[in-house]
Amino acid sequence: MIPNWRRLLAATALLTSTTTVTATIDAAAPSNNDESILHSELASQQNSSLLWGPYRPNLYFGVRPRIPKSLMTGLMWGKVESFQDFQNTMRYTCEQNEGMKGYGWDEYDARNGGVQTIHDRGNGLTLTTSFVKVPGGRNGGSWGARVKGVLGDPEQRTTVILYVTQEGGGRLEAERGEEKRGYEGDVVLSGESEGLGGYKLVVTKGEGERPTSTHEISELEAWGEGGRTTVQSLQYPDEQIWQAKPIVFRQLKEQVDWLVENKYDNAEHAPPVWQVFTLQNRPGKGNVHIVQKVFEGDFEFDVLFSSESAGTELKSEDLTREIKAGSEEFGERFGGVFALKAPFNADKYKKFGRSMFSNLIGGIGYFYGQAVVDRSYAPEYDEVDEGFWEEAAEARARHAEALEGPHELFTSVPSRPFFPRGFLWDEGFHLLPIADWDTDLALEVIKSWFNLIDEDGWIGREQILGAEARSKVPQEFQTQYPHYANPPTLFLVVEQFVERLLNTNGTAAVHKERLSQSESLANASLENPEVGLDYLRKIYPLLRRQFQWFRKTQKGDIKSYDREAYSAKEAYRWRGRTTTHCLTSGLDDYPRPQPPHPGELHVDLMSWVGLMAKSLSNIGDALGFAEDVNEYRTILDAIEHNLVDLHWSETDGCFCDATIDDFEENKLVCHKGYISLFPFLTGLMKPDDPKVGRILALIGDEEELWTPYGLRSLSKKDALYETAENYWRSPIWININYMAVKQLHYVATQDGPHKEVARDLYSRLRKNLVETIYNAWEETGFAWEQYNPDTGKGQRTQHFTGWTSLVVKIMTMEDLEGGAKATGSEHGHDEL
């Protein structure tokens, strides 16, 4: 129980005055010692609550703690019906080409657990993995998982392997059973490590028929006749043990080689397939333990982890109880947090919304390892000369990158099969729905990212930590460069937190008695305002440092080209451009001025810097940093003016990138599309601005951006529409469409000349987006990276449950078409 609720409630009430927030909170606190105890107690509970999870999102099911070099588990399975197909049917890492009908979390909460269903058509199997956490003890408590398989063919043989490893020393041992040939009952592994203390991992016997064999090798002590669980305990170098499939197949190959040598490889004399691919039982000590079961037909078994510090061992009946309780709590809470609005309040949309959100939050992972970074700071990286992209490419080839770290990151991944790692600009979009559900989980993720910031203010845009993460990335994309930026979307989430903190007014604390422990921890920084403010004070200098890094390293050139602008300072250019791509912008192949020029200016980047200034102004205001706030407001004013002076095209009716022509004069290059909307999308335009009307006309034009499925990324009239890679040159992307829906809603709920047009566009776009994503999910079982502007079909990366999950927030937005009163946005246009 967290102490002193009366004092905390009084402190919360004082938060209504933003200019004196620091002084009033300090005055409300009886002593620094009491506050320190509160912070320490909450920090301990947060760490314990979030220690364990399916934090290996690159696997179909893999559990680990947020501790470097620790215990890890991974589930592997496949049918064993034919020698030819065995290797192709084995599942372990999430892949796009394994014929899945869909897979993912049906419900998931990061503090309790959840239920995942995997529809494995290739194996004729529906696999369910239920995961729960049980608090208690000093080391993060205990956890359990239930693995259940339902087969289309009741006679099909399926092998299921739990791959258990422990990095970094410690002890892990498989206790020997009564029978040398395998385990009739449960398998018990006992271990100890620095971060976890002592623990026990039990793999229960479970339920299901086991195949048996009368083949003569069944008489050999090493092989057995089947029907038992087998364990092989091995010792490998730490840097290799993540390679589960190669290690398992290497062990199996030893057996196959023996069978061949002993003439058991001809069709008449061969053992059954399942027996050939059943490992011999060799339990003992090691840092790799392969626990294998073979079933005939349906099956079920449990994996039970018990921390010694908890005092009691977790049992299967406990797991059954916790799965039921967790599912009931999730169902009750989801409807309260995400109250879906008409016309999306039917049961089918509720099921869809639960799945989309659960897969977003269930895609959170913990990564640890070294990153590849080029800190040569080659002069060519300044990109100041014409032809800079060629010079930079030559410098990259010349200069050797180096491994830095190890670092750790707690992050939500965009796609488990294709992008199982941290992406900086994706993360802010991911955390918007997550923060609605669990504020403090979102704050933990943000803190993890800002722990990576260097002394200059740079955070690598893509975090590829360790050999396992690098195995999914082509070598040419692994190196990170400290002059490369990425859209700073984390500012969106921090600003949202500030607004909620200021608007809490004690209501969360008043109703604390009605909250579960996990739900209370999810909002602890709101319920305990001094904790929330302490978080802001700690992260604010890092936010400011990143803002200053952006303004220094990504600045554009105004003075050298005699550009006329309100401010001679506020202009920006993405570094890292080539003739075909601007990867740092996040919009990759979106058309930019050709050829690239050091005098180029990018309207989307200036908009992002403006958003940073606006966010920092609000955060600084909440913390009472008046001098800083005045600085941010001055910068924001200059940016808002310069967006018009440097980027607005009256002829085209939109914002455009700028470059320098052959006569060394400023020239606007207008490729109408997402880029053209950025000052609007980032909330830097007032709702009564006449230019907003031109932007709305562009959005609503079917020959430009409007489609029945969402806004296309590039105008249908553009000469480069659907050309080359066609990544951001026509497809519909949900993150940008979400930003458009939010800003349309804001304009639609403010009195002004554009209200009715915005209301119509908002209502239609909201419906179009939800139906597009829902229909593709219903048809394929997946959320997709992008959607086709002509058909609405999902395309490119499947299981893209990152920012596509913003559809859940879109479904919770008000139905203006249905006659809901439009009285103004609840949070204003600053909140995305």
Image (cartoon, grey):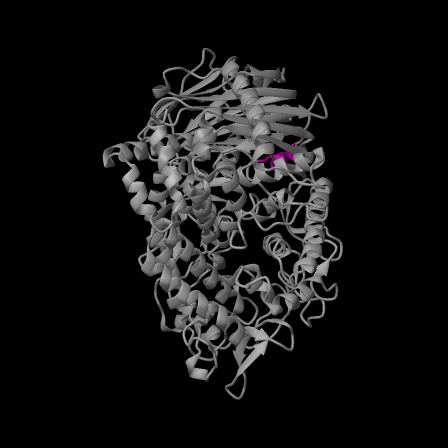
Q: Position of residue 478 (x, y in %)?
A: 46, 56
| Residue 311 in view here | yes
- The structure residue drawn at horizontal position 66% and vertical position 35%, both measured from the top left corner, is 350
Q: Position of residue 675 (x, y in %)?
A: 58, 65
287 and 131: which one is in front?
131
Residue 87 is one of the magenta-drawn residues: yes
Q: Position of residue 476 (x, y in %)?
A: 49, 59
Query: Quadrant of residue 368 in the image?
Result: top left
Instruction: Please state if 677 lies on the left or on the right of 774 as rendered.
Output: left
Instruction: Please state if 610 lies on the left or on the right of 214 as rendered.
Output: left
Quadrant placement of the N terminus: top left
Can you name the residue that lies furthest to the bottom here?
A: 663
174 and 775: which one is in front?
775
- The structure residue drawn at horizontal position 68% and vertical position 55%, both measured from the top left corner, is 759
Q: Is residue 746 above or below residue 512?
A: below
Residue 460 is one of the magenta-drawn residues: no
| Residue 457 in view here | no
71 and 527: which one is in front?
527
Give the residues in magenta: 83-91
Q: Position of residue 586 (x, y in %)?
A: 53, 59
- The structure residue drawn at horizontal position 49% and vertical position 33%, both measured from the top left corner, is 110
